[in-house]
């Protein structure tokens, strides 16, 4: 999967049901896409939800950029703003204090590359959700290819017999290509759980920090659909 800043629950559920996670960080991304999550995600507020977005150095750069080369724009006070947004909206949550020290440290550091920041938030959430899986970077694997051929070659490089794709993979993955190489393709259609939030009226598709702040040690069971339905 592509790196993401404070990923949502479905991202982690796919990791939890897999044997290995490969971060797809040496591919190009359209920074103007409305579906991008590499540098932003959603947090719950009393009025619904809002984006927290990491500003990027894109001046003078056109078209698609390689993910592992994108730099964070640190001339803006985004880190202080993100910490304040999370603190303001989650300080009354049951488990906010458990994560506050980490958040203060995270946002006190200067981040050069977006992938470094995204991977840091991802690793923290993986640990907090007690999901322990091998974590590889495609940029370090020396594997070539485009689109589904790249995915296939990454699977072959680690000896995979099954590839779990997101639901949009149905539009471009050639399953026969994978099957010819002894690899089965499954599609991940995550059924989002409903769980207690700080504010009334449940909002789905938040960053996984929303679940952790509100549900603590029960978070993984809720993530996996084992409890938490209101």
Image (tube, rainbow, N blue to C red):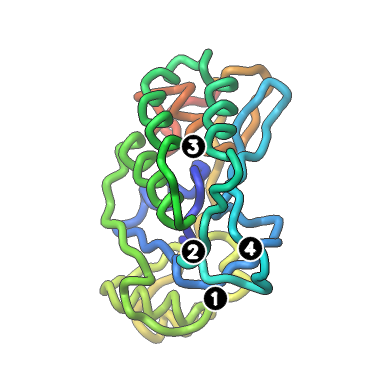
Q: Counting residues from the N terminus, which is met first, the one under dot 4 or under dot 2?
A: 4
Q: CA distance from mark 1 to mark 4?
A: 30 Å
Q: Counting residues from the N terminus, which is met first, the one under dot 1 or under dot 3?
A: 1
- Frontmost of labels 4 and 2 is 4
State the image coordinates of residue 75 (x, y, percent, origin top left).
Answer: 58, 47
Out of 221 and 137, give the one closest to the viewer: 137
- Frontmost of labels 1 and 4 is 4
Q: Counting residues from the N terminus, which is met first, the one under dot 2 or under dot 1?
A: 2
Q: Is residue 162 left or right of residue 67?
A: left
Q: Is residue 113 left or right of residue 182?
A: right
Q: Residue furthest front?
A: 75
Marking on residue 173: 1
Q: Is residue 172 visible?
A: yes
- Frontmost of labels 3 and 2 is 3
- For mark 3, give the secondary structure: helix
Labels 2 and 1 touching (C-beta < 8 A) = yes
Label 2 sits on residue: 165
Q: CA distance from mark 4 to mark 3?
A: 27 Å
Marking on residue 61: none
> At 63% from the left edge and 63% from the top edge, which residue is drawn?
58
Label 4 sits on residue: 58
Label 3 sits on residue: 208
Q: Counting residues from the N terminus, which is met first, the one under dot 4 or under dot 3?
A: 4
Residue 96: quarter of image? top left
Q: CA distance from mark 3 to mark 2?
A: 20 Å
Q: Counting residues from the N terminus, which is met first, the one under dot 3 or under dot 2?
A: 2
> At 36% from the left edge and 84% from the top edge, which residue is drawn?
181
Q: CA distance from mark 1 to mark 3?
A: 28 Å
Residue 124: quarter of image? top left
Out of 103 and 168, give the one closest to the viewer: 103
């Amino acid at each position: 999967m592509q790196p993401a800043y404070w990923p949502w629950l479905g991202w982690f559920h796919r990791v939890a049901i897999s044997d290995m996670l490969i971060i797809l960080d040496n591919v190009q991304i359209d920074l103007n896409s409305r579906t991008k999550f590499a540098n932003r995600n959603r947090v719950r507020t009393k009025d619904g939800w809002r984006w927290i977005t990491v500003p990027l150095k894109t001046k003078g750069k056109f078209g698609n950029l390689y993910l592992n080369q994108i730099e964070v724009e640190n001339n803006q006070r985004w880190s202080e703003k993100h910490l304040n947004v999370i603190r303001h909206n989650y300080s009354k949550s049951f488990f906010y204090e458990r994560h506050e020290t980490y958040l203060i440290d995270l946002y006190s550091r200067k981040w050069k590359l977006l992938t470094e920041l995204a991977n840091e938030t991802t690793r923290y959430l993986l640990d907090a959700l007690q999901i322990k899986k091998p974590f590889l970077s495609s940029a370090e694997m020396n594997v070539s290819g485009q689109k589904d051929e790249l995915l296939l070659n990454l699977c072959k490089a680690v000896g995979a017999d099954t590839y779990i794709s997101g639901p949009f993979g149905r539009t471009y993955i050639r399953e026969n290509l994978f099957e010819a190489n002894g690899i089965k393709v499954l599609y991940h259609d995550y059924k989002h759980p409903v769980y207690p939030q700080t504010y009334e009226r449940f909002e789905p598709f938040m960053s996984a920090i929303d679940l952790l702040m509100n549900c603590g040690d029960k978070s993984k069971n809720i993530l996996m659909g084992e409890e938490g339905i209101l």
